Image (cartoon, rainbow, N blue to C red):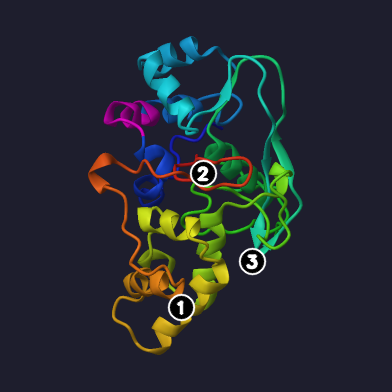
Amino acid sequence: MRRPSFQFYPADWRNNANLRRCSDAARGAWMDTMCTLHDSDEYGVCRWPLTELARAAGVPVRLLRELADKAVLKGSDGAHEAYVYTPWHAGQAGQPVVLVQAGSGPCWYSSRMVRDEHVRQARGGSSRFVSTKGAPKSSPKASPKPPLGEDLGDGSTSTSPSTASPSDPALAVSARGAIGIALKAAGLDPTSFNLADPRVDALIAAGATPEQWQGLAGEALRAGKKHPWHWVLTVLPDRLNAGKAIKPANRHAGFAAKDYRAGVTDDGFIAAS
């Protein structure tokens, strides 16, 4: 039975750097496109040319090209690479899974929707819209939703920064994703920090490591700082001996900061069916 709705994550939508770089019109077009991908027989995937997808979604094709240029809409009208998902559990990377095979025909998709569909299937496909008659009493537990910011690249799903190789996109991890994991490990509430803040990119470029982020976050919590995330952003530049605070990019210009990713980018913000 086709599901009448899909999940939507407001925090991911607001904080995804790739999506924030798009125009207001393109962000609106993405919502209509997600609805079209939700109705697709192959969930989250459309194997039509981009012009036909635009017609079906009721949006100008130029807006879909803008979304594709910003790595929000994935795929190509020609040859396209495989989409590889690496699940996470308890801070450890699982076995990479190819969710969209590489091919030569038109193929457009939302990596978040494809990934969430895979997670549902891993749980056994049970939901209030699917019959559970005859299903086993228990099913394998799927990996939790990636930390805010990871995957921000529909974020990126990947492995530990200490073992990932930039030449291996299946095992690559985004710099922001590694920081998100480190902050959570320190005990910081994921809803209290924003990895799309341009100052994060500036500190990454200055050489800040996940261990430094984790150490400062722990220090802020032990000291009882009222706003530990902002305290970390203020103190970390000095700890890096930068000489002066690293200033964020102009917020009014949109989140045009470079998305620091080692390997495949991921939209990681949006809804999944």
Residue type for callout 1: Leu
Disc on the earlier residue, 1 or 2: 2
Between 75 and 237, the one lying in front of the other is: 237
Mark 1: secondary structure: helix
**Labels 3, 1: front one:** 1
Distance from label 3 to label 1 (Cα)? Answer: 19 Å
Between 209 and 196, the one lying in front of the other is: 209
Q: Which residues are magenta?
A: 22-31
The x, y position of residue 242, in whole percent, is 41, 67
Q: Residue furthest right?
A: 95
The x, y position of residue 123, in whole percent, is 66, 52
Residue 230, magenta (yes or no): no
Mark 3: few, some, or many residues within 10 Å (few <14, many ≥20)? some
Q: In this figure, which residue is indicated by the disc labeled 1?
A: 216
Q: Is residue 46 visible?
A: no
Q: In this figure, which residue is indicated by the disc labeled 2?
A: 153
Mark 3: secondary structure: loop
Q: Residue furthest left?
A: 252
**Labels 1, 2: front one:** 1
Disc on the earlier residue, 2 or 3: 3
Q: In this figure, which residue is indicated by the disc labeled 3?
A: 91
Distance from label 2 to label 3 (Cα)? Answer: 18 Å
Q: Residue at x 35, y 40 (%)?
A: 20
Q: Is residue 110 left or right of residue 158?
A: left
Residue 201 placement: quadrant:
bottom left
Disc on the earlier residue, 3 or 1: 3
Mark 2: few, some, or many residues within 10 Å (few <14, many ≥20)? many
Q: Is residue 90 above or below residue 204?
A: below
